[in-house]
Image (spheres, rainbow, N blue to C red):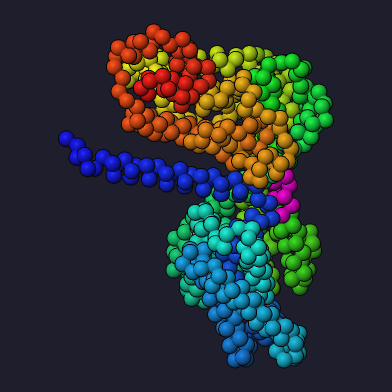
Amino acid sequence: MNDPGLDEPAAQAAQDIEKNVYEADQLQAEEEEQDFLDPSAWWIASTASPLLAGTFGPVANAFSICALVENWRVYIPSGADEAHGENVKDPKWLIAINSISLVFALIANMALLLNMARRLSFNIAQPITITGFYLASILLIVLVALASTSIFRIEPRAEHALTQAYYYGIMAAGLYFVIASLMVVTVHGAYKGHYPKEFRLTPSQRTLMLQTISFVVYLLLGALVFSTVENWRFLDAVYWADFTLLTIGIGGEYVPMTHIGRSLLFPYAIGGIIMVGLVIGSVRSLVLERAKQKMSARFMESERQRVIALLDRGERSIRIGLFENIRLREEGKSETHRREQEFRIMRRVQQVAERNRRYVALAMSATAAMILWFIGALVFMKSEKPQGWSYFISLYFAYTSLLTIGYGDYTLSSNSSRAFFVFWSLLAIPTLTVLISNMGDTVIKAFRDLTMWVGSLTVLPDEKGAMSAFKVGVKRLRSGKLSQEKGEIGTVTHATGEQVAMDRLTEHIEEDELAEADEAEERGDILERDIHFYHFILAKEIGQLMRDIDASPPKQYTYQEWSYYLRLLGQDEADASNHRKPNGNHDTEDHKHPDIGRADGGEGSDDKLRWSWLGVRSPLMGNKTEAQWLLHRLSARLTLEMRNMRKDQKESPPISMSDLRKKRTSDSNGSPKQELQNGLGAAEVRRRHHGDGVKA
């Protein structure tokens, strides 16, 4: 037995919860839309710059520690080299200034991390961060400059050299200055109002920073242990730990010789490899998560505007690729055919934009890797001049190190090259990770597809014969893709949207879960039967989309499937009232914010936006996959239907079975079930029949 005093508060609470959920969804949608439209430069300022600062800040702190723990000068005895010189004690003022610089940098880095964790406000943390990093950089720059003058250097200079600590000080100063400058750009954009004064880092971005800190601490602690066990200098142990954990294995004189050292190597190397793997995984996820998304959006919009510009000139064909034209149908065709034409063109726009993005990303990452290789080789040649290294030998050493081959036939002997190698090899981790990821999307995939195609022509012939495989390969090559992709639209199926819809409806009719609809039909309530039937279809389609949402690569639906889903949302592709011609500039589509991907007018809204498959409101635009878009809309539609049904049950007066029979006899406006099949949603059916007294 229900307590009547609880019914109204419970209903109000449910409405409040639903309202909050919809408000949260709306805010999230607006943020995603704005993120899609924002220029890439401001995304770099708001997200990439803080991420780089948070990642390289701990690395710079580690280099400052390396610059502090050892002396900056050595005396070179007769017959020795600078790597085996005798330490010359540093003056106290250098140690003091170096220590102050480290303290400033640690405070600045801590303020930045606390701000990213939202433990310290933006207005307080950023002045501390920027000032601290700039002061740390300036102090180290002053020390580095003095170290090259007669105030610090000891005569004769030929018998003295600078240690690895000095060169670590140079790298730390440079990193501090770059980090502070990046944060200045971030603060400038925030105060100009381009983004909020807070960091909205994703879990993978936070994870990357934490993993970087953990790896640096792990490297330094391991170097401290092995320097004690093997009686190495600490910075020599840092150099050894670096090429060990990165599995480069240069070798030379720095290898564990004691039983304790070799025993400790087992767990230390395994732990380091795991941590490096985690960092690589985080870098790869970041590339796939944000950079890829941003580049895809830019290429998609650029290609879309190019195609629309050709359409606006009234041309009867559109050149999509180098060897591919899409011919437009003649005038006088139906609205469904015209919309299908738009859909096919948009599909090709998607494919061309994604292909261009992949190859541009590959070119950028390959260029970064080449720069790292060539500049690294140049530095190694200059620093290893006493060994007589040529540029070709330096290229060979840098190449075998980048690919972690590590033959060990050439090893570094100068203090400058060893310190630089640590920094250079750490830069190689994200650079090569991004390069390999991009090669997997392009070169490796193309090589795999080419191998399968050649195999179908030779040793593993296709079922349809070698000539058929050859023709298919040539056709795909002309369209710019050798392999068949999901959602390929080379041909248009002859099945109409009505046929696909009826097939899907028939499948649902054969199910056993239509108990409520059957009961309503037994009572003679045809409208309630059809509404339950419509709700059941929505629920079943949501279940199917839940399976599609995890598909890899993301599932792409045919035009007939899209036509069916849009009819479930209350739109008919044959009805031109909600359609418009595509517009190339999204800023001119009726209002300032064009509702990216909001083809249905928004969740829970009766407002119908006029949209085109080639416009910015197209469901194929935005940063959601097609399954995500449909799942979001159908779920919102089902929720709205349930709320309206509950509201109607409270407001509508009861109706007798005799009145219902009279209603069924006198109703000449068509069956509600037929209206549902014609593309009308349950809400529209309810509006058409509710005024005549039929209970919904």
Which part of the image, by quadrant, shows the C terminus?
top left
Quarter of the image where one finds residue 470: top right
Asked if 543 appears above or below 498 in the picture, the reply is below
Seen from this angle, which residue lies furthest left?
1
Quarter of the image where one finds residue 318: top right
In the rendering, at what x and y percent does residue 672 appear? 45, 16
Task: Please say whether residue 260 is one of the residues in the magenta stretch.
Answer: no
In the rendering, at what x and y percent does residue 539 appear? 41, 27
- Does residue 32 appear to the left or right of 368 in the view shown? left
| Count of all numbered marks drawn on residues in the image | 0
Does any portion of residue 311 appear in the rendered image? yes
At x 63%, y 79%, the residue is 135
Does any portion of residue 76 appear in the rendered image? no
Task: Please say whether residue 367 is one of the residues in the magenta stretch.
Answer: yes
In the rendering, at what x and y percent does residue 67 appear? 60, 78
- Does residue 680 appear to the left or right of 599 in the view shown? left
At x 44%, y 60%, the residue is 267
Front one among 587 and 245: 587
In the rendering, at what x and y percent does residue 34 appear? 61, 48
Quarter of the image where one finds residue 61: bottom right
Front one among 587 and 285: 587
Q: Which residues are magenta?
A: 360-368
Front one among 174 and 524: 524
Q: What's the magenta bit mostly, secondary-structure-wise?
A: helix
Asked if 403 appears above or below 598 in the picture, the reply is below
Which part of the image, by quadrant, shows the N terminus?
top left
- Does residue 362 appear to the left or right of 245 in the view shown? right
At x 72%, y 91%, the residue is 151
At x 54%, y 51%, the residue is 281
Front one among 237 and 585: 585
Seen from this angle, which residue lies furthest top?
665
Asked if 101 appears above or below 597 in the picture, the reply is below
